[in-house]
Amino acid sequence: MTTENFIASSSLALITSGSTTWKTPSNIALVKYWGKRDPQLPENPSISFTLNNCHTITTLSFEKKENLASDFEFKIVFEGEEKPSFQPKIQKFFERIVAYVPFIKAYKFVISSENSFPHSSGIASSASGMSAISMCLMQLEKMLDPSITEEYFYKKASFLARLGSGSACRSIKGELVVWGAHKDIEGSSDLFGVPFSSEVAPIFKNYQDTVLLVDKGEKQVSSTVGHDLMHGHPYAKNRFAQAVDNISKMKNVLEKGAVKEFIELVESEALTLHAMMMTSQPYFILMKPNTLEIIQKIWSYRAANNSNICFTLDAGANVHILYPKVEKEAIHRFIEEELSVYCQNAHYIHDEVGEGAQEIK
Ligand code: DP6
């Protein structure tokens, strides 16, 4: 599929008003997306687990404008309060997508969202937030053009979400999602995420993820700035090649249920992401002392208990702990007794693999 396939007809018959509500999850990358080029295309393919409990619910209400002014008209309400500060981000998103959904100029929108996780938890809300708006816009497109297929509906939702935030395209459909063209992944594309279609070993089907909230503050480095640091980065070329290679390895690991290799790959990916930031210009350390304390504890616990616990990191200090469901009880105890002290206000969130976007009727 090419970009042109995603252009909606400009002559759709418009309905007067309505609304639609979608719930979409966050996701956690196993092989990381870090580095992009215009327009929101990844420098390397990535793969993530779709989460379940960390999600955004968005209602898009729309009303046909009386006269077709050329500007976008929308109001943003977040957790019950109007949020003009979110306006520029959505304005930019609309500018990027209007060529594909020209009907958005014909409507006045109210976009009301709420997150299942606390607002300033340090959990990236752009993936769930942008995917939720994209699902709502696709639902509107489907109301205007009921002939679109289910495949097109989800692919284009992911395509739109990508233009809002790269990782958001992996929060649409599937338990494991690959974004970025890769020779071993059928149908993969830089334009949208695709469900990982190979057989997945049972152990990875209901994997658990507990997010330890080490630092709930504003991100020290926005992801846009972070991705930018990969331009001219001395190790960029090797990093992108390594990620391509790691996708092949990950595919194999997921098919075979090779948990030990999974652990090595996932932790290496997390540390490589942070190594890229430590070796960029300017350089950043995004981990906090407690991030390292937690990593050390995880390694000790793993060795002492022959456990399959491991960690991954986003571009921040919080730690995602990944583990098979059979170890859930023991690891929940370990987290409560030994790791919660390293979290801000002892705060962590238990999550697990989920399936993607759901319409709320
Ligand atoms: C470290 O998707 O937040 O979480 O495309 O600029 O919105 P933008 O960036 P974003 O980057 C996420 C980077 C990451 C790794 C990953 O999720 O793959």
Image (tube, helix red, strand yellow):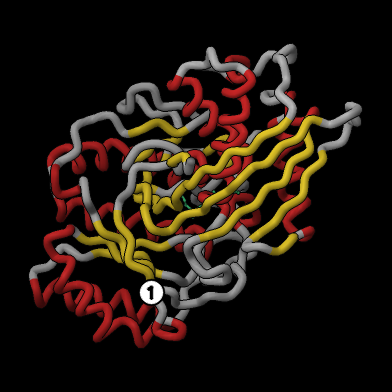
Task: Quadrant for residue 250, please give it.
Answer: top left
For image coordinates 43% across by 21% down, the residue present is 151
Q: Position of residue 145 (x, y in %)?
A: 60, 17
For image coordinates 35% across by 50% down, the residue present is 30
Q: Is residue 126 left or right of residue 274?
A: right
Residue 80 sits above or below residue 301 on the image = above
Task: Quadrant for residue 349, please give it.
Answer: bottom left
Q: Position of residue 220 (x, y in %)?
A: 61, 69
Amino acid of disc 1 = Tyr
Q: Position of residue 345 (x, y in %)?
A: 45, 85
For image coordinates 19% across by 72% down, the residue present is 331
Residue 57 sits above or below residue 309 on the image = above
Q: Position of residue 42 (x, y in %)?
A: 53, 38
Secondary structure, mark 1, is strand
Q: Is residue 324 visible?
A: yes
Q: Nearer the viewer, residue 40 or 248?
A: 40
Residue ID for mark 1: 348
Residue 146 sits above or below residue 331 on the image = above
Callout 1 crowding tier (Cα within 10 Å): few <14, some 14–19, many ≥20: many
Residue 167 sits above or below residue 331 on the image = above
Any atom of ligand 1 within 8 Å of the CB at mark 1? no
For image coordinates 53% across by 28% down, the residue present is 191
